[in-house]
Amino acid sequence: MNPLLLFVFVLAIYLGLELITKVPSQLHTPLMSGSNAISGITVVGAIIAAGEGGVLATVLGTIAVAAATINVIGGYLVTNRMLGMFKSGKDA
Amino acid sequence: MEAWQTLAYIIASILFITGLKMLGRAQTAKRGNGISAIGMLIAVVATLVAGGLDYTWILVGLVVGAAVGALAARRVQMTEMPEMVALLNGSGGLASMLVGWAEYVRADGVVTFSAIAIVLTVLIGGVAASGSVIAFAKLSGRIDGKPFLFRGQKTLNAAILAIVVLAGALVALDAALPGGVPAVALAFAVVLMLALVLGVLAVIPIGGADMPIVVSLLNSYSGVAAAMAGFVIDNNVLVVAGSLVGASGLILTNIMCKAMNRSLANVLFGGFGATVSTAGAAAQGEVKSLSPDDAYFILEAANSVVFVPGYGMAVAQAQHVVKELADQLVKNGAEVRHAIHPVAGRMPGHMNVLLAEANVPYEQLVEPGDVNPAMETVDVAIVIGANDVVNPAAKEDPSSPLWGMPIIEVDRARTCFVLKRSMNPGFSGVDNALFLKDNTRMIFGDAKATLTAMVASFKES
């Protein structure tokens, strides 16, 4: 385990807080579901566990891959669907 | 890790950051979502082609997950979006928890730092997973949305957390001490199980009206859990992406708390709405009701109309007929706006999503600060299934539990219609003095039926 990751962690949190300070309330739900899809990045860890492990680790990893993929695919698609509905009166 | 793989993860991280930034602006949001999805694809492919993996079960997981995710995203009704978001939070948290567990099983002689990361991944992921399931059950009405409180709740939570910390320390010590600590596998199982119990206990005391806060907080947890999993498998892209989500969830949580003028601690431990039924001064005045037909004559003469939707509009599925009535009013020469309180509904942005589904252009959607200053010039404010967010007690009655909460001040409009089934108080259980004001007219009945009748009157004329 690499303690340098702690450095990355703190900087990334700080970056996240700076990045999303002012979000119009119209975008609250898409921001939530869209960022939620990003948290499905844990699929990377799940793939390694499912592909490298022993029996128990493979079982846990496979379930984790499925759960994380639901998170990723479901999150991105539903966000895309929602954002597609937001229309300006000028477009109509 | 190969150099090209590190490079791919860096590119993925940059795409996540860019995508998230673009998600924060209406014009760029859709492209931002796509950019972040490309980042995810790059990260997954880079992991898959790295080699040394047996693909059989990975593919099973990917195919099953993609099918379920795609189907759910396509099928879900916009009114069910809070439930959908809760379930997505839960599946992300569950995945991180399982990754932590699998790494614990795989690791032979982990060092202390990794052991701590594993415990934190399992703990935070587990709380996000089971907490989201309870949030889902409350949102979908499978269990009662009211706060569930019992004596000694806080003591119990504190005790469980203490046991988790102790058991977690045992797991970490196992790595540090030569020869290991006895019963450490049991300690790990305790962490695993109590994490799930904690998630349940954390969400059951929280009432329906506070759900926007809980949903955004669970969103933050699922991100932090992914970041912790990054510590466990020593992977930068998990740490960066997870932290970004953790931070954005925290910001939303904070916005929601401010919109209710309450602290996060008060929301999490308060059991708001369970104990306040006697608080607040009794309101004075009498209820004046109106029929939809009479309401039409007032609307017909109005130059400026503001709709104030709330959770009741979602329940009645009335967003489409709201749009129809708004169109009729615009055709009649009135200026129409929809004033949306940040915590209206059951998740952040709930009302915006519903009105967008009904094709309401987003120029008509405004925030309380946009309508409050000139509320006196509004001819009719139409409150549809909103209650606490328009309760004047928030600024008139210091003894009210809502005191100090920023509201949409419809009581200052020339006329205020309140569409409501009955005189029952809102989710907070607080009486609403708005209903008794001189300029308020109650229009009882199903909101959708009432609005449909008004639209029909416009069409006939």
Image: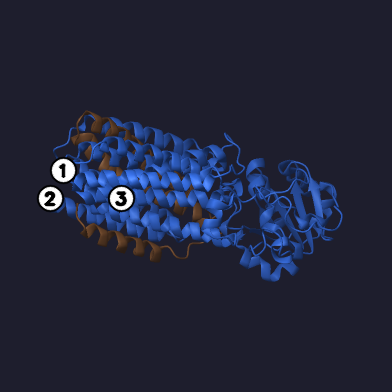
Chain colours: A brown, B blue
* Spatial CA span between label 2 and label 3: 22 Å
Query: Secondary structure under badge 2?
Result: loop
Residue pointed to by mark 2: B2
Pointer 3 indicates a residue of which chain?
B
Position of B338 compared to B230: left or right? right
Dividing the picture into quarters, in which one does residue B422 lie?
A: top right
Mark seen at residue B5 = none
- Residue A14 locus on image (x, y percent): 35, 64
Mark seen at residue B50 = 1
Pointer 1 indicates a residue of which chain?
B
Position of B82 compared to A8: left or right? right
Q: Mark 3 vs mark 1: give the one in front.
A: 3
- Residue B42 visible at all: no
Residue pointed to by mark 3: B228
Label 1 crowding class (10 Å Cα cut-off): few <14, some 14-19, many 20+? few
Q: Which residue is pictured at 62% across the width and 67% down the height?
A: B369
Tell me the kind of residue under disc 3. Met
Q: Are marks 3 and 1 on the same chain?
A: yes
Pointer 2 indicates a residue of which chain?
B
Label 3 crowding class (10 Å Cα cut-off): few <14, some 14-19, many 20+? many
- Residue A2 locus on image (x, y percent): 19, 55
- Residue B382 visible at all: yes
